[in-house]
Amino acid sequence: MNKTEEANDERHYILLVIAIVIGIVGVYLRFADFHHSSLVANIILIIGVAIALKAVFAILK
């Protein structure tokens, strides 16, 4: 498989969609009203960013 086909592999984009959904959940949890909601939202958002960066670097590789 050449680099173009590898970069266009659908598993990278599925991983990006999952990361975006996790990030959106983190953003929406900022508006929730429970104890430590901001902390939980930040942790979920960081996990989403880490997954997205992993996917982007896999595409660029």
Image: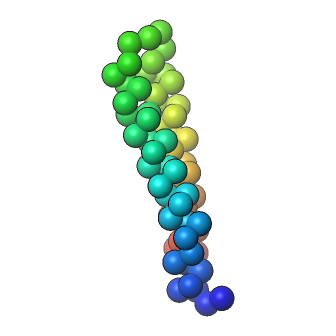
Of the 4 image quadrants, the one containing the N terminus is bottom right
The quadrant in which residue 29 appears is top left
Q: Is residue 6 visible?
A: yes
Q: Is residue 49 visible?
A: no
Q: Examine the rendered structure and indicate whether residue 17 appears above or below residue 26.
A: below
Q: Residue at x 44, y 11 (%)?
A: 34
Q: Residue at x 48, y 14 (%)?
A: 36
Q: Residue at x 55, y 41 (%)?
A: 47
Image location (x, y in percent) of residue 59: 53, 71
Q: How is the image coloured?
A: rainbow
* Outermost residue, bottom side: 2
Image location (x, y in percent) of residue 53: 51, 56
Q: Is residue 59 left or right of residue 27?
A: right
Q: Examine the rendered structure and indicate whether residue 38 appears above or below residue 2.
A: above
Image location (x, y in percent) of residue 11: 59, 66
* Outermost residue, right side: 1
Q: Residue at x 53, y 60 (%)?
A: 14
Q: Is residue 36 left or right of residue 24?
A: right
Q: Is residue 28 left or right of residue 45?
A: left
Of the 4 image quadrants, the one containing the C terminus is bottom right
| Number of marks in picture | 0
Q: Examine the rendered structure and indicate whether residue 14 appears above or below residue 43.
A: below
Image location (x, y in percent) of residue 22: 49, 41
* Outermost residue, top side: 35
